[in-house]
Amino acid sequence: MKILSWCAGIVFAAAVLLFALSNRQTVTLGLWPFEEGLAMPAYAAVLISLLAGVVVGLLLSGRATLRHRRQARRQARRADTLERELKTVKDGEAAATPSSPSAAAKS
């Protein structure tokens, strides 16, 4: 699986490199309230916007994931507590009941 991951990474890096080399012309990006535009290579504009989208997506999905992880931790702690209580109850019952029928007959 690790080899497949490395191969996919190499292919992705090669595609990004080819994209950057093919789109070196300068573009000017403007934002409404500002008079001056920002001049940068076309590949940089595309890759920066792609990276910004990935970061925003990771932040939004991470927020939901954290909520589920917190709930799972809480439920795991509750299950551990209940298992300890059950073990205590079973140990108490085992001590209260005779272990063999012959021991019960002697008393």
Image: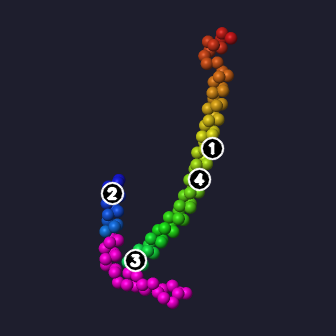
Residue beneath the point at 63% across and 40% down: 81
> Is the residue marked by circle 2 packed among few (<14), some (14-19), or many (20+) residues within 10 Å?
few
Residue beneath the point at 35% across and 54% down: 2
Q: Position of residue 55 (x, y in %)?
A: 49, 67
What numbered label is drawn on residue 44? 3
Comes first in the chain, label 4 or label 3: 3
Q: Where is residue 79 in the image (x, y as percent from the top left)?
A: 60, 42
Comes first in the chain, label 2 or label 4: 2
Comes first in the chain, label 4 or label 1: 4
Indicate whether 87 appears above or below 33. Answer: above
Q: Give the range drawn in magenta.
A: 15-42
Pointer 1 residue: 78
Pointer 4 residue: 70
Q: Distance between the residues labelled 1 and 2?
A: 39 Å
61 horizontally vs 1: left or right = right
Q: Where is residue 84 in the image (x, y as percent from the top left)?
A: 62, 35
As helix, strand or loop, the secondary structure at mark 4 comes to helix
Residue 85, quarter of the rendered image: top right
Pointer 2 residue: 4
Q: How far apart are marks 4 and 3 (CA)?
A: 38 Å
69 horizontally vs 26: left or right = right
Q: Which amino acid does label 4 sit on?
A: Arg
Q: What residue type is labelled 1?
A: Arg
Taking depth in this image into account, of 86 and 100 the one nearest to the observer is 86
